[in-house]
Image (cartoon, rainbow, N blue to C red):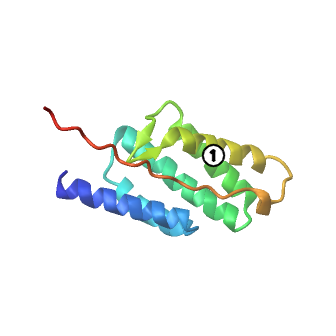
Amino acid sequence: MTEETRDFREKFEHGVSQFNSGRFFEAHEIWEDLWRPLAGASKRVMQALIQSAVGSHHLQKGNRHGAQSLFRNALGKLSGGPRRFCRVNLRQLEKDLHTASVLLATDRPLAHIKLLSISLETPQKRSSPK
C-alpha cells in the first residue's frame, strides 16, 4: 500500500467515524476533500457518501425535504455501481438509504426515523502462497 493510498484510507475512515458519531457535516467536509481529485466510479461513490452525510445532517436538523432529496440523489449515484468501496458494503448503504427515503415520504415523525450508519467490513487477510 502506498503512502498516498494509506493517507486516503485513514482520512476516509476518519470520515466514517465522524458519520457514525452523528457529526455528518464534519464527515461531508472530510470526504469532499477526498472526492475532488477522483474520477469515474470512485468519484460517484464518494458523491453518494457525501450526499448521504448532508442528507443525514438535514434529517438531524429536521429538514425532511432536504434529507429525502439528498438520499434519493445518493441512491441514484450508487445504483448499478460497485458493491464495495473502501470496506463499505454499498448494497447495505443503498438499502438503508431506500428505507429512510420511504419513511421520509410518510408523515412519520422525524425522530422515529433511524439515522444512517456505515459499517466497515473487516479486511480479509491475504493468504500467502505455499
Q: Residue furthest front?
A: 130
Q: Amino acid at mark 1?
A: Asp
64 lies above or below 69: below
The residue shown at (62%, 40%) is 95
- Of helix, strand and loop, which one carries label 1? helix
The percent position of residue 115, horizontal first and vertical second, equals 66, 58
The percent position of residue 54, horizontal first and vertical second, equals 57, 60
Q: Residue furthest right?
A: 107
Q: Which residue is mark 1?
A: 96
Q: How many marks?
A: 1
The residue shown at (40%, 44%) is 85
The residue shown at (37%, 43%) is 42
Residue 109 vs residue 62, the one in the foreground: 109
For disc 1, the neighbor class at 10 Å (few under 14, some 14 to 19, many from 20) is: some
Res. 34 image quadrant:
bottom left
The percent position of residue 73, horizontal first and vertical second, equals 59, 44
Left or right relative to 127: residue 29: right
31 lies above or below 85: below
73 lies above or below 53: above
Q: Quadrant of the C terminus?
A: top left
The residue shown at (44%, 63%) is 15
